[in-house]
């Protein structure tokens, strides 16, 4: 098996379910992968007996996957970070307990979990709520599954926004040995950590939760600059973090045995993972997107904008002529009653039709130029990535 422990999120759906998940991972050249045991947006779950787990595990063995490094992700609907609504809090705990058991049912040992949001009840309450929920789950699940709390981008009242906060949660739990973290490169970049200095980040992890607690790394580029707090993933090498920094993350010897999982966006409804894994394995960026098509699309967009702005300019010209007509009518109503000096002064302040026409043309041309500039700017930005 390849030494580089890397893979991606894969789907799990009928008719082949888990067998299909493994087949998908193999097709990408993966050595690990991550999946959901059902839809990530809800708690509905098919019985394990239906999911072709035995067949999937047999294929894992055939391709020499280490099952202990396969990752399950908990559904997004779980929020154990606030207890405002006891019914919702209890339901979140129950759903999490079920996911832990299902993870073990697949033969997996790592479950990634978003810590949740304290919903304006305060960080201290958030920490307390998370610890109580984790202790409740881990006291009765009967498995050896570890929960990896994912680092978050810092939107709203999200928890898990610093390694220090993660350390506080883990240290307060009675089951700290079974709790670790999942580091997401997009999230920490959006939360003002510089991924280009990844060893410094790992030093921070070591000083807080400890490197042994780093159970998973989500390798994602970011659509947003550092510190944006937005959490929008981008394809490897096409975002603000960049290929060089992410390649260094993947090949960092300090996390050699940590599963590295891609969650980058599909392109034209197709997964990018095979080519992204190939790039990272080779350590060389490949501009695999259809840049010529992208360029033409942005050129067309610029021309369309230019045409729209030209039309707007014509509208301005038409409006200017109307204004001229109204000004002229107003002036002519009492023009004869004015003295010669007043007439001369008034004439010098009124734009004639030719002036407004030229102004309208200038505005139209200016907007057309702006439209083309916008198109060229976006084209250049895409090609630069």
Image (tube, helix red, strand yellow):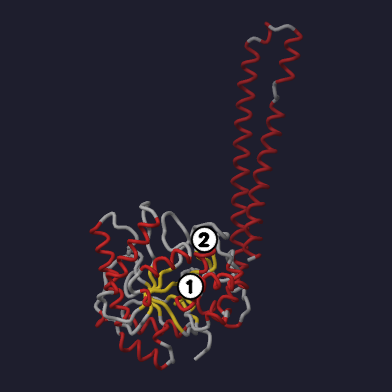
| Left or right: 124, with 232 as reference point | left
**Residue 230: percent from left, percent from top:** 49, 58
Q: Is 364 situated above or below 11? A: above
Choose between 369 and 54: the one closer to the eye: 54
Q: Say which quadrant the C terminus sits in.
A: bottom right
Choose between 34 and 129: the one closer to the eye: 129
For discs 1 and 2, the disc positioned in front in the rendered view: 2
**Residue 200: percent from left, percent from top:** 59, 70
| Left or right: 165, with 240 as reference point | left
Residue 218: mark in rendering: 1
Kindly report the distance in space between the C-alpha atoms of the residues bearing marks 1 and 2: 15 Å
Q: Is 2 situated above or below 118? A: below
**Residue 111 appears anywhere in the view:** no
**Residue 300: percent from left, percent from top:** 60, 57
- Report the residue at 43% width, 80% height from top: 33
- Report the residue at 61% width, 25% height from top: 323
Classify residue 329 by image quadrant: top right
Q: Is 335 situated above or below 219? A: above
Q: Residues within 10 Å of mark 1 (few under 14, many from 20)?
A: many
Q: Is 200 situated above or below 366? A: below
How many numbered dots are placed on residues in this image?
2
Q: Are marks 1 and 2 in contact (CB under 8 Å)?
A: no
Secondary structure beneath label 2? loop
| Left or right: 276, with 26 as reference point | right
Q: Residues within 10 Å of mark 2 (few under 14, many from 20)?
A: many
Secondary structure beneath label 1? strand
For marks 1 and 2 on the same chain, the one whose residue lies earlier in the sequence: 2
**Residue 218: percent from left, percent from top:** 48, 72
For this orientation, the residue located farthest to the bottom is: 62
Residue 191: mark in rendering: 2
């Amino acid at each position: 098996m390849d030494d580089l422990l890397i893979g991606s999120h894969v789907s799990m759906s009928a008719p082949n379910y888990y067998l299909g998940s493994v087949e998908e991972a193999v097709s990408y050249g993966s050595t690990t992968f991550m999946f959901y045991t059902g839809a990530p947006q809800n708690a509905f779950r098919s019985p394990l007996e239906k999911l072709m787990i035995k067949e999937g595990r047999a294929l894992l063995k055939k391709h020499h996957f280490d099952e202990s490094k396969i990752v399950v992700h908990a559904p997004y609907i779980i929020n154990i970070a606030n207890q405002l609504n006891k019914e919702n809090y209890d339901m979140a705990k129950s759903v999490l307990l079920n996911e832990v058991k299902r993870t073990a049912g697949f033969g997996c040992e790592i479950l990634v979990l978003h810590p949740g949001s304290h919903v304006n009840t305060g960080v201290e309450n958030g920490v307390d709520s998370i610890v109580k929920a984790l202790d409740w789950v881990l006291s009765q699940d009967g498995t050896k599954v570890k929960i990896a709390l994912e680092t978050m981008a810092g939107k709203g009242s999200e928890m898990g926004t610093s390694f220090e906060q993660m350390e506080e949660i883990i240290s307060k739990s009675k089951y700290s040995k079974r709790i670790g973290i999942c580091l997401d490169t997009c999230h920490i970049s959006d939360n003002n950590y510089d991924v280009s200095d990844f060893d410094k980040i790992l030093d921070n992890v070591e000083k807080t939760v400890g490197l042994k607690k780093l159970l998973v790394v989500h390798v994602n580029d970011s659509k947003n600059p550092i510190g944006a707090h937005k959490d929008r993933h981008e394809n490897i090498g096409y975002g603000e973090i960049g290929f060089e920094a992410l390649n260094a993350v993947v090949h960092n010897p300090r996390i050699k045995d940590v599963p590295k999982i891609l969650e980058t966006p599909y392109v034209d409804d197709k997964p990018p993972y095979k080519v992204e894994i190939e790039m990272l394995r080779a350590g060389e960026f490949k501009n695999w997107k259809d840049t010529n098509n992208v360029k033409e699309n942005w050129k067309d967009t610029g021309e369309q904008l230019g045409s729209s702005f030209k039309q707007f300019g014509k509208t301005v010209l038409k409006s200017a002529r109307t204004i001229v007509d109204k000004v002229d009518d107003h002036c002519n109503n009492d023009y004869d009653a004015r003295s010669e000096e007043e007439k001369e002064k008034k004439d010098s302040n009124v734009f004639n039709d030719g002036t407004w026409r030229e102004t309208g043309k200038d505005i139209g041309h200016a907007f057309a130029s702006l439209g083309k500039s916008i198109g060229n700017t976006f084209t250049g930005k895409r090609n630069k990535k």
